[in-house]
Amino acid sequence: MFKGAAAFSLHIEELARNNRMSHMDAVLKYCADNYLEPEDIKSLINKTLKDKIEMNMREANLLPKQATLDV
């Protein structure tokens, strides 16, 4: 297992990059490969990983767009 959320996040980043998939897909693949339910790893998902998953979901139009400021 992982020593903490940071190590898990790095593993998911690497899995997503190597397999060219979204971070959410990488988390679900990790769960499937290790016979875990997503609820079992919720304590390992830190804010950075959560933000990246949210960004992927917004890009895929699964979450509403947020307003941005033109600077």
Image (cartoon, grey):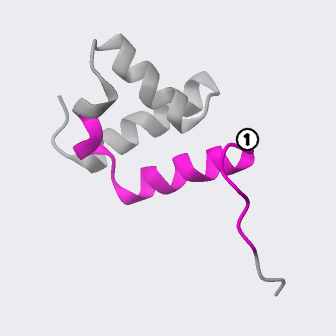
Q: What stretch is highlighted in magenta?
A: 41-67
Relative to residue 20, is residue 10 drawn left or right? left
Left or right, 21 with reference to 15: right
Q: As shown in the figure, which amino acid type bears the numbered disc 1?
A: Ala
Screen quadrant of the C terminus: bottom right
Characterize the magenta stretch by its predominant secondary structure.
helix
Front-most of 7 and 38? 38
Q: Mark 1 points at which residue?
A: 60
The answer to whether 10 appears left or right of 1 in the picture is right
Percent x, y of residue 56? 63, 45
Q: In which quarter of the image is the N terminus?
A: top left
Quick one: SS at disc 1?
A: loop
The picture places residue 32, in percent across and down from the top left corner, at 38, 14
- Residue 35 falls in which quadrant of the image? top left
Image position, residue 43 (x, y; %): 23, 45
Image height of 39 relative to 71, above or below? above
Is 11 magenta? The answer is no
- Queried whether the magenta region covers residue 49, the answer comes back as yes
Residue ID at (28%, 33%) = 39
Q: In this view, does 68 lie above or below 44?
A: below
Q: Nearer the viewer, residue 51 or 18?
A: 51
Which residue sits at x=29%, y=50%?
6
State how many labels appear.
Answer: 1
Q: Which residue is drawn at 28% across and 41% down?
A: 42
Expressed as whole percent of the image width and height from the top left, the position of residue 16 reads: 54, 31
Q: Which residue lies furthest to the right in this view?
A: 70
Does 53 sit left or right of 57 as displayed? left
In this view, the residue farthest toward the bottom is 71
